[in-house]
Image (cartoon, grey):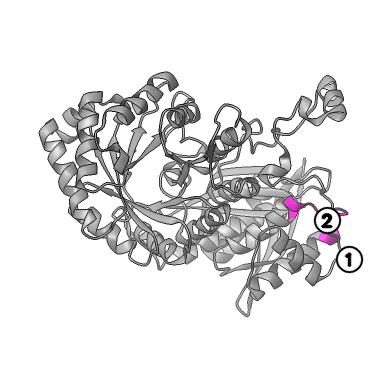
Amino acid sequence: MKNKILIFDTTLRDGEQSPGASMDIREKLEVARQLERMNVDVIEAGFPIASVGDFEAVKLVSKEMKRPIVCGLSRALKKDIDRAIEALRPAKHPRVHIFLATSKIHMQYKLKKAESEILKIARESVAYAKKHIKDIEFSPEDASRTEPEFLKEVVETVIDAGATTVNIPDTVGYAIPEKYGALIRYLKENVRNIDKAVISVHCHNDLGLAVANSVSAIANGAGQVECTINGIGERAGNASLEEIVMILKTRNDIFKGFTTGINTKEIYRSSRLVSQITGIMVQPNKAIVGANAFAHESGIHQDGFLKERTTYEIMLPESIGLTESKLVLGKHSGRHAFKDKLEAMGFTLSEEDLNKAFERFKDLADKKKALYDEDIQAIISDEIANVPETYQLEYMSVSSGTKTVPTATVRLKKGDEVFEDAACGDGPVDAVCKTIDRITGIKGKLSNYSLRAVTSGKDAVGEVFVRVDSEGQTVSGRGASTDIIEASAKAYLNAINHLLFMKGKKQPRKPTPMCD
């Protein structure tokens, strides 16, 4: 009989705590839709008490999600719990996730409370939340450094109070697989009421062991794993969803009977989406979703692979949503064929967004002989995850060279008005950015700039990600084009539009939550 492991995705909460990975409400919703498409069991949508933005994001995700459980994080405080309950009100399947530190070091230095006080707070907070929502998860923060006997007492207490899931977080990535697995087995065998709750695990990657610890926990009785797309998260990150899922799928000779409900063919697309939105690029040698994960350069490897694929591949690229039939559309393709291709790739666009995307597709098809799935994904990512375009790029021309002062002329459109200006800079990108500043009146500082080729070949689409600071606000922007200067202009203008969009929507700064 198969034992289903629940996949609890915390990309929108813990993943967003990764430095520089902040997402706005539209981006969070787009990621949540993809997580639902991938069939995750639980989406931790945010920490409602942290800010107005987080509250609204949890509320919107709650309203939009049809199948998965939507979870909101809360400290063991009534005001936090009330805020989470309010944000989760539209959810079909709501869950409140309460956390409270239990290790000696946290109790002594952070909370300044005794064990008896911790037990009382834990019991009362869970009981209070249970009056309003049936599905309650409790996390004894820093569980891997908590005395096992006290941890057992905490777990028994919160289950008696109504917790349906007990999470055992390795908050600082301190555990090693053998010891962590033994801790899960200890709780499974010694907590008297453990049959009334699911054991969950939430592992951080400070020692590079988050996935190994999670898998060890599964082997020893855990029924839920908390993880993120691409393993992003606080400090060194979290356990990687794609790695855990594919370990259970690929090594079913070891993990007999264990399965997940994940649609693995959506893994690569999920990875790309999160990378594009956060600007955190996936390292080429990253397991499962890295650019080199299914690449073979060694002559010996190539020879073996061509004779028998399984000599050097333990997974099929198709199993995570990659395709080997790359050439799919060209400049003679029509709107109907383009729409069919998008639907086959899992994209559903409004008529307005479809028309915009098709125009960009035709422009790109005129510049490239061959279009790949990644080209189309880059186009769609720009359209569906973009902020409203206060300014649109109409025209740009750049003059640059070894003995020429880099100069850019840019024409932007705002409604029915057209603005044109020129500026010099230290380089062509700097000149373009300064010209955009002159036109928009927004002075931005480029704090991060990254460029990567979306596809291969001399006519590859270049994808530019920028992070721009202005008047105490930091936003991200992205753009794609076969011309990297144009891609840079689009990315920078995207960030400027983001700043303009946020001007009337200022929210209190979100504090870093003291959580797992």
Q: Which residue is mark 2?
A: 328
Q: Amino acid at mark 2?
A: Val
Q: Which residue is mark 1?
A: 332
Q: Give x and y (percent) for residue 115.
A: 14, 31
Kindly tell me whether residue 263 is visible in this rendering: yes
Viewer-closest of 430 and 293: 293
Give the farthest residue toward the bottom: 416
- What is the distance, in whole Å, between disc 1 and disc 2 at their CAs? 11 Å
Q: Which residue is rendered at x = 19% and y = 42% of the image?
A: 122
Q: Give x and y (percent) for residue 256.
A: 55, 31
Region in magenta: 365-375
Up the image or down, 14 lies above or below 363; here it is above
**Quarter of the view holding residue 90:** bottom left
Q: Residues within 10 Å of mark 2 (few under 14, many from 20)?
A: few
Helix, strand, or loop for circle 1?
A: loop
Q: Give x and y (percent) for residue 309.
A: 80, 31
